[in-house]
Image (tube, helix red, strand yellow):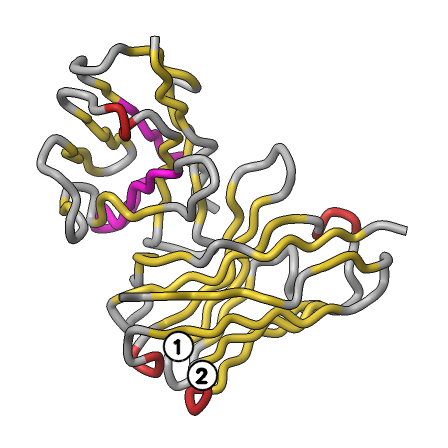
Amino acid sequence: QVQLVESGGGLVKPGGSLRLSCVASGFTFSDYYMNWIRRSPGKRLEWISYISGSSRTIFYAESVKGRFTISRDNTKNSLFLQMDNLKAEDTAVYYCARALPENFYAYVDSWGQGSPVIVSS
Amino acid sequence: EIVLTQSPGILSLSPGESATLSCGASQTVYRHFLAWYQERPGQAPRLLMYGASTRATGIPDRFSGSGTGTDFTLTISRLEPEDFAVYYCQQYASLPRTFGQGTRVEIK
C-alpha cells in the first residue's frame, strides 16, 4: 500500500526558511517521479515542482523558482522541499505526490495528507 | 500556461442521480493528458481518471471520463453517498501543471 507522509511544516516568519520532508513506503521509490503540490487558503491547487527518479530532471513553477529546491534521497525513500525566502503567499498545505509513468507526461496517482506551512510575522 | 475552468462550481443532486462535470482548457491539452481527482473532507485527493478516459485502479465503472482538445467531462452515474465530494481536473501535458478550481457535488 502506497504511503506518503509529510513533515516539517509549521509557522515561519517572512524571509525565513523551512524544509519539508516526505517519507514514502509501499513502492520502489526510485522508480517514480515525485511532486510537491500546494493549496493556499481560498485558492486552487498549485503544482510547485517535480523531480525524476534519478534526480536528473527537475522543474519548478515560476512562483517558487529560485527560492525552493526539490531533492530526494532514494536510499532513504525520502523527498524534500527546501523553502527559502518565504513569503506570506507561500502559506499553504503542501502535499507530496507520486507520479507515473517515469517520463515527462507523468500524472499524479497518490497523495500524502499534507503538511501546513504558515508564513506570518 | 493552460488555464482549466470547471463548471458548474456546485452541483446539487440526490443519490441515484447522474452528475456531469465539465473542465474547459484555455488551449489544447496534448494527447488528452488530463486527470480527474476526488477529494473528500479530511482526506487526500484520490485519482479517478487519467488520459481523460482511463479509470484508475479500483475506481468503479459508474465513473467515466471523456473529451479531447479543450473540452473534457467527468460523468458519475447513479451517485452513491460516498461520491458527494469535490472534484478537480488537472492537465499534465505541459508545464506548469495546472488544476481546475473544483466542482463540489453536494446532496440536494
Dots 1 and 2 on the same chain: yes
The answer to whether B95 is drawn above or below residue B101 in the figure is below
In magenta, the rendered stretch is: B21-39
* Mark identifier at residue A55: 2
At 22% across and 49% down in the image, what residue appears?
B50
Instruction: Identify the amino acid type marked 1.
Output: Ser
Question: Would you say B49 lies left or right of A84 here?
Answer: left
- C-alpha gap between disc 1 and disc 2: 5 Å
Residue at the far top: name it. B108
Q: Secondary structure at mark 1?
A: loop
Tell whether label 2 touches label 1 (CB within 8 Å). Answer: yes
Magenta-drawn stretch contains B36: yes
The quadrant where residue B14 appears: top left
Residue A75 is situated, as x and y percent measured from the top left of the image, at: 43, 91
Name the residue nearer the viewer: A101 or B16: B16
Q: What is the quadrant of residue B81 in the picture?
A: top left
Query: In the figure, A114 relative to B76: above or below?
Result: below
